[in-house]
């Protein structure tokens, strides 16, 4: 069977900048940051008391109103990561113009939404409940409200999608792996449409304390949280935790064309690798990242000189420059002509949702022919030859975008997107 | 605690947990057949009654609480 082409026809997002894809994107291009002192719980006793939280409100001005997405009685039964995922999935499905499918078509629509950690906050609260009030008080919704694959399950139940129902867990590369794996399911004929992405909600005491203990989080910017996420900058000191969800609708190109769907970009490449090195740190030259990028390029059948924009993993940790080295080795002489930025400078690090929102930003970079900025990059590394888009968006031609995601355990996922001629 | 008081508090819990209109919570209303609950909802509802009234409802008794009336009658006998 000839391999099928896969395109993105719908996108949805709940991010620390806004609820909604376009609202988030305009704020990203405008150079806004989603960081602030943590509101969801009192974090002042922790080494880090700031994060990039989803702005809650009545739904106006880009705020996230849970009641817009799930009935209050249903919200009680799920962890917040599922709520974020359901909101982003609903946006993506509406954006793609799905609806009114036949039973046969429904059997060809699948869901692949992952999470890095799942219902961490609910797990912690339930443990306290058992300690304080006994095991009989545990809610029957505790398990189904915390399991990572339950966004995929909930989306399937809500919309009637009866195709492959799956989920990815690969820490901070979850979102990219989910989109890459789902695109292969379409390519190989398991489904015609896949709802794919990631969601995360780990801004709680156990999440912040846990990442603080691995020395992964920024701690020095309590007085100025918006300056804390500063990928590649000399004064970076760790990542800033984000939360939310990014979901795309992936579709067989011929199906999308036949129904006259809007097409954001084509998923032309997907590369994976393992570092076989360390549970939290990349190897000094990050050859694993380089191999994953080369695998994506090879699979796409393009030249490295075709790559115009790189949305970096770029978490604002020591690993940023290691990634930059791998990208510059990959691109070779072409590095001086490409642009690379880290949108985590604005959104923080959404862990299992990061790769998904960054695939969306990459698709929008292609649509609008603009590379989003890297905020707070005041002193770039001396060996940077690639343009890192410090402080300001870069309007430029973008036909092909590469998005990197790397996760604890030494797992790497790379997506390649390309503009589709109208 | 008066019978009316018990009825009122049980009804409030049912409305809160199942998200139904108060008028629908009648004597013979079945949680599953009439009020849209599934089996997990009924487990949670029984836990909510236990919490509300400070009682323990054993599993075999809980299985027999199918309607609003069943719940009220059991709780009247237990408090």
Image (cartoon, helix red, strand yellow):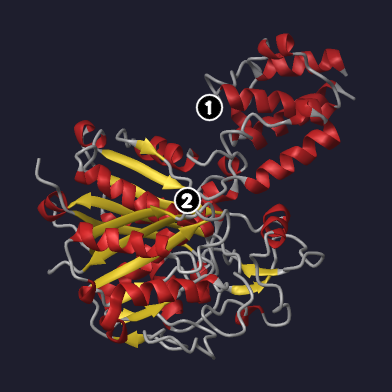
Q: Quadrant of residue A230?
A: bottom right
Q: From the viewer's perspective, is the residue at label 1 or at label 2 nearer?
A: 2
> Image height check: is A29 above or below A11?
below
Residue B55, visible in the rendered structure: yes
Question: Which chain is indicated by disc 1?
Answer: B
Residue A185: x and y in percent read 26, 42
Classify 10 Å Cα crowding around label 2: few (below 14), some (14-19), many (20 and above). many
Q: Secondary structure at mark 1?
A: loop
Residue A47: x and y in percent read 76, 67
What whole-number distance in Å separates the C-alpha atoms at marks 1 and 2?
24 Å
Q: Nearer the viewer, residue A138 or B55?
A: A138
Identify the residue under disc 1: B36
**Residue A249 vs residue B30: left or right?**
left
Classify 10 Å Cα crowding around label 1: few (below 14), some (14-19), many (20 and above). few
Q: Quadrant of residue B35?
A: top right
Question: Which chain is indicated by disc 2?
Answer: A
**Residue A217 vs residue A249: left or right?**
right
> Image height check: is A310 above or below A143?
below
Identify the residue under disc 2: A85
Residue name at image x 72 percent, y 59 percent: A213
Residue A13, visible in the rendered structure: no
Residue A353: x and y in percent read 48, 57
**Residue A403 vs residue A230: left or right?**
left
Residue name at image x 47 percent, y 39 percent: A149
Residue A276: x and y in percent read 48, 52
> Image height check: is A54 above or below A125?
below
Q: Secondary structure at mark 2?
A: helix
């Amino acid at each position: 069977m000839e391999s099928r082409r896969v395109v993105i026809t719908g996108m949805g997002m709940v991010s620390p900048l806004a609820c909604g894809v376009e609202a988030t994107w305009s704020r990203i291009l405008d150079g806004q940051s989603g960081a602030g002192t943590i509101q969801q719980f009192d974090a002042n006793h922790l080494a880090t008391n700031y994060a990039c939280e989803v702005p809650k409100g009545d739904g106006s001005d880009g705020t996230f109103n849970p009641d817009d997405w799930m009935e209050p009685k249903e919200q009680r039964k799920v962890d917040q990561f599922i709520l974020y995922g359901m909101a982003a999935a609903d946006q993506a499905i509406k954006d793609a113009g799905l609806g009114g499918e036949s039973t046969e078509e429904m059997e060809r629509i699948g869901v692949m939404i992952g999470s890095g950690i799942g219902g961490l906050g609910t797990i912690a609260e339930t443990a306290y409940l058992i300690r304080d009030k006994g095991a009989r008080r545990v809610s029957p919704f505790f398990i189904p409200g915390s399991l990572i694959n339950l966004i995929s399950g909930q989306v399937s139940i809500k919309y009637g999608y009866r195709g492959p129902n799956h989920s990815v867990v690969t820490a901070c590369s979850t979102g990219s792996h989910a989109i890459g794996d789902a695109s292969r399911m379409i390519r190989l004929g398991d489904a015609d449409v896949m709802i794919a992405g990631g969601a995360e909600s780990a801004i709680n005491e156990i999440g912040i304390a846990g990442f603080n203990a691995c020395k992964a989080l920024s701690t020095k910017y309590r007085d100025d949280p918006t300056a804390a996420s500063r990928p590649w900058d000399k004064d970076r000191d760790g990542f800033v935790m984000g939360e939310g969800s990014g979901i795309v609708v992936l579709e067989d190109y011929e199906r999308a064309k036949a129904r006259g769907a809007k097409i954001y970009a084509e998923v032309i490449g997907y590369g994976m690798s393992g570092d076989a090195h360390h549970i939290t740190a990349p190897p000094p030259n990050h050859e694993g990242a380089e191999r994953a990028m080369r695998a994506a390029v090879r699979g796409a059948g393009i030249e490295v000189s075709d790559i115009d924009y790189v949305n970096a993993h770029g978490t604002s940790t020591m690993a940023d420059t290691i990634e930059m080295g791998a990208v510059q080795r990959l691109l070779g002489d072409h590095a001086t002509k490409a642009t690379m930025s880290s949108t985590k400078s604005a959104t923080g690090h959404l862990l299992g949702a990061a790769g998904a929102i960054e695939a969306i930003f990459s698709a929008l970079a292609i649509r609008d022919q603009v590379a989003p900025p890297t905020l707070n990059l005041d002193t770039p590394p001396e060996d940077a030859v690639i343009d890192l888009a410090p402080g300001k968006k870069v309007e430029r031609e973008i036909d092909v975008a590469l998005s990197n995601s790397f996760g604890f355990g030494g797992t790497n996922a790379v997506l390649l997107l390309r503009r589709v001629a109208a | 605690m008066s019978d009316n008081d018990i009825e009122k508090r049980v009804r409030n819990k049912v409305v809160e947990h199942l998200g139904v209109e108060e008028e629908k919570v009648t004597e013979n209303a079945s949680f599953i057949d009439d009020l849209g609950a599934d089996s997990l909802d009924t487990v949670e509802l029984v836990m909510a009654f236990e919490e509300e009234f400070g009682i323990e409802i054993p599993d075999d008794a809980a299985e027999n609480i199918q309607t609003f009336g069943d719940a009220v009658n059991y709780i009247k006998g237990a408090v």
